[in-house]
Image (cartoon, rainbow, N blue to C red):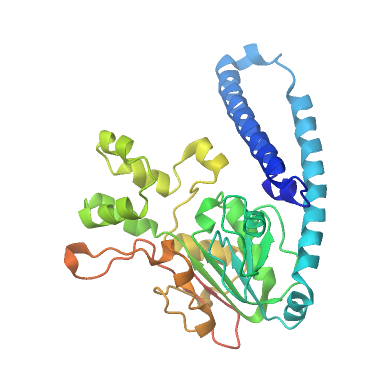
Amino acid sequence: LRMAGAAGAGDEHGVYRQVESRKTSLEVSIHMVARLIGDLHALGREGAGVGGHEELQEKILAMQQEVDGLKALSLESQMANLGPRIRDQAAEGEVRLHVGCGRSTIPGWLNVDLHGWRLNEGDGWEKNVAKEQVLSLNAATTRVPLPDASCRYIFASHMLEHLGHPVETGVVLEEWHRLLAPAGVLRVVVPDARQWLDAYVQQDAAFAQVARQEWAFWDWATIDKAESALDYTLPYLGASGLQGSISGQHQFGFDLAAMRAALIRAGFDPASIRPCSYQASAHAGLRVDNSSQAAGVRSMPGGLQPLEPFAPFEEGGGDDEQGTYL
């Protein structure tokens, strides 16, 4: 809705406020439906006569059809604004695609984000004054409007963990597999669930200090009252519940095995998958981890060896094979 509502807006800020208000209303409705489901389970056969769900489904489907139409118009307009350069790059399999860019666009890349329109319109975000190529779409529901095998590189940092797993992550990974050229490479950075869990078990104070410094906006006062690192560890690794799912918080915690399995299911060659460290891609064009603040967060336990709470996994092939960098 954010993407579709912003497309072609005349009274920009008025439209944005309307879209945000509608989003909030829908979130309330989702919580109400979730409570109803629980109550109906508790009623058992006594709740069998409760009606209205079919009408509700019809209204949701009608809204989805309206949004799908707006999405199509939005993407058509956005692609036209990008100009012929992106089409030429796609025809040659040379597009560099940055998915989940947030505020951190990479010059010369096609930067994609759920809130991409905010970069172009400057609604609460820095306006896209550098005129980077920005595309606003919901990667979990919408295909990137590029032909098959059009991308030389795809980069995504701290994006996959925000999607439902394995369904939404599978959809996105299959889409990236479709977009990669035969010699293309995908680099994915995700939070390393194993390191977070190890830090909890070992009561690693240095690790916790880094989390507190880098995520100062977390509700540390409430977390401290709970006196348990689980209060921030588990939500960070996906245990954020219905509200987390609605608001885009982390939905899953990947380790190398889970990431490998997801990539293989999406069609990537198991032999091409390998872990990699920060800014250490074998491909110079993919040494872009420094464009992501989260990807570079590190702590120094005991002041000695560096610990990477957000270690990039890397998997990819040589110049003649398709690969993926995690």
Q: Is residue 90 above or below residue 134?
A: below
**What's the residue at 21%, 50% (across, down)?**
203
Q: Position of residue 104 (x, y in %)?
A: 53, 64
Q: Is residue 204 visible?
A: no
- Dividing the picture into quarters, in which one does residue 223 lie? top left
Q: Is residue 289 above or below residue 52?
A: below
**What's the residue at 74%, 18% (across, down)?**
51
**What's the residue at 62%, 63% (across, down)?**
128
Question: In the image, 155: left or right of 253?
Answer: right
- Dividing the picture into quarters, in which one does residue 172 lie? bottom right
Q: Residue furthest top?
A: 46
Q: Is residue 19 above or below residue 116?
A: above
Front one among 109 and 68: 109
- Dividing the picture into quarters, in which one does residue 221 lie? top left
From the image, which quarter does the N terminus lie in? top right
**What's the residue at 44%, 42% (across, down)?**
239
Front one among 250 and 82: 82
Q: Position of residue 73 (x, y in %)?
A: 82, 54
Q: Position of residue 256 (x, y in %)?
A: 43, 64
Question: In the image, 70: left or right of 134?
Answer: right
Q: Position of residue 273 (x, y in %)?
A: 50, 74
Q: Is residue 61 above or below residue 69?
A: above
Question: In the image, 266: left or right of 275?
Answer: right
Q: Is residue 21 visible?
A: yes
